[in-house]
Amino acid sequence: MGETHAESVVRELYRDLLTAWNDRDAERFASLFAEDGVLVGFDGSQVDGPEIAKHLVPIFQDHPTSTYVARLRELRILGPGAVLLRSIAGMIPPGDGSLNPAANAVQTVVAERRLPGWRVVLFQSTPAQYHGRPEATAAHMAELAPQAANAELLT
């Protein structure tokens, strides 16, 4: 069974979110969130919609951020106008072509259909540390390695 229109739109919303990060564009990243949306960052920072761009600007200015590659795990309709997206993600440091295992993540997006379109109400990026399970880290890396090698953002 193929994706519904809502699932397809949310997949593209997630792609746009990761692309804005990879382009180091704080304003565009923040514009994808609902006014009452929330960003939960890799370090546990919790940032409300109106503050997201202000939160990201110094990160992009002061740090050479890594770029994302991600693989979808699930797209699920939660109800009329609401979709859950789950993925695994990896990051490629600047000037490097390989994934950094310390930056592996599990990501969640909850999106709602709002005027003028779909918006992120929650984006959470959780470190995928896999404590005591090196085989899980290896599997995470192996799954994303072909995308990293081909600079393919999302599958």
Image (spheres, rainbow, N blue to C red):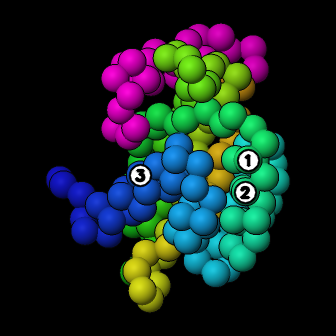
Residue 42: percent from left, percent from top: 73, 43
Q: Amino acid at mark 2?
A: Val
Can you say whether 133 is above or below 37 in the image? above
- Quadrant of the image containing the C terminus: top left
Q: Is residue 85 left or right of residue 1?
A: right
The stretch of residues the image draws in magenta is 131-155
Residue 123: percent from left, percent from top: 61, 58
Residue under numbered circle 1? 61
Can you say whether 24 is above or below 89 in the image? below
Q: Helix, strand or loop at disc 3?
A: helix
Q: Helix, strand or loop at disc 1?
A: helix
Q: Label 1 neighbourhood size at 10 Å, few (<14), some (14-19), many (20+)?
A: few
Q: Report, in whole angstroms, how far the alpha carbon at label 3 lies from the one at label 1.
A: 22 Å
Name the front one of labels 2 and 3. 2
Residue at 42% of width from left, 61% of height from top? 13
Between 148 and 138, which is closer to the camera in this rendering? 148
Q: Label 3 neighbourhood size at 10 Å, few (<14), some (14-19), many (20+)?
A: some
Q: Report, in whole angstroms, how far the alpha carbon at label 2 lies from the one at label 3.
A: 20 Å
Residue under numbered circle 3? 15
Q: Residue furthest front?
A: 61
